[in-house]
Image (cartoon, grey):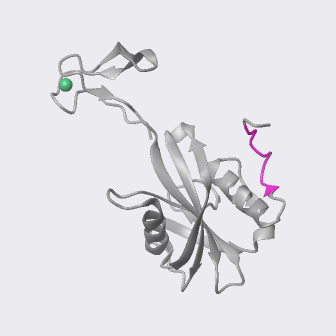
Amino acid sequence: MKHQFNYCPNCATPLQQISQEEDGGAKVRTRCPACEWTHWNNPTPVLAAVIELADREGQVLLARNAAWPGKFFGLITGFMEAGETPMDGIAREVAEETSLQVDSLKLIGVYEFKRMNQVIIAYHAVARGEIVLSPELAEYKTIPPAEVKCWPAGTGQAMADWLVSRGITPQWLDLPPRRPTE
Ligand SMILES: [Zn+2]
């Protein structure tokens, strides 16, 4: 999410686009002319989980966010809380959003989500228990991994990378995203 500040949160002076020397050279940023507060606009880390259901023959869980338009099902995601580790955070998010208990976690990878100014930290979570969705999620489905259709976004790439790690050639809903290495 790109936050738009109009006034300095430190001293309430109207902010301006000001060029200033930084380690990488001069850079225009939203800055306060009075107290030199700078809106760095650094990407926010977002945690995501490919959930493998230990008590449903290893099917994966995809969920549809109540706020999303259409019928798109994706990974369980959430923001880290101050003071928690990424692994604590994703175990907490999985429990809060699905009621599942996480048995184990393994990092899949780290992905960009430039449009939202986020960085996605994706884990493979083995989880078990009864699925009870939080109000944030409208519905879920469980699918054998080989039948999952990946989607062209960071979380979809995480899903695809996890499938590849399982020896499964990912299927894509749409064209696969172009990767910088290709
Ligand atoms: Zn200020």
Query: Where in the figure is residue 177, as x and y percent of width and height?
Result: 74, 42
Query: Where in the figure is residue 127, as x and y percent of width and height?
Result: 57, 78
Outermost residue to the front:
23
Q: In the drawing, does residue 123 fall left or right of residue 44?
A: right
Q: In the drawing, does residue 167 fall left or right of residue 55?
A: right
Q: Point out the image quarter for the N terminus.
A: top left
Q: In the drawing, does residue 112 fall left or right of residue 13?
A: right
Ligand 1 appears in which quadrant?
top left
For image coordinates 27% across by 21% down, the residue present is 15
Q: Point out the image quarter for the C terminus.
A: top right
Q: Closest to the observer: 22 or 69?
A: 22
For image coordinates 78% across by 60% down, the residue present is 164
Query: Where in the figure is residue 112, as x and y percent of width and height?
Result: 58, 43
Magenta stretch, overall SS: loop
For image coordinates 82% across by 64% down, the residue present is 168
Q: Quadrant of residue 63?
A: bottom right
Examine the structure image and report whether residue 92 is included in the region drawn in magenta.
no
Outermost residue to the left:
11
Compared with 167, 8 (above or below) is: above
Q: Closest to the observer: 42 or 24?
A: 24
Q: Quadrant of residue 2?
A: top left
Q: In the drawing, does residue 26 fall left or right of residue 158?
A: left
Q: Closest to the observer: 68 or 63?
A: 63
Compared with 97, 34 (above or below) is: above
Which stretch appears magenta?
171-179
- How many marks do you count on the picture? 0
Query: Where in the figure is residue 180, as x and y percent of width and height?
Result: 72, 35
Q: Quadrant of residue 8?
A: top left
Compared with 157, 38 (above or below) is: above
For image coordinates 62% across by 60% down, the residue present is 74
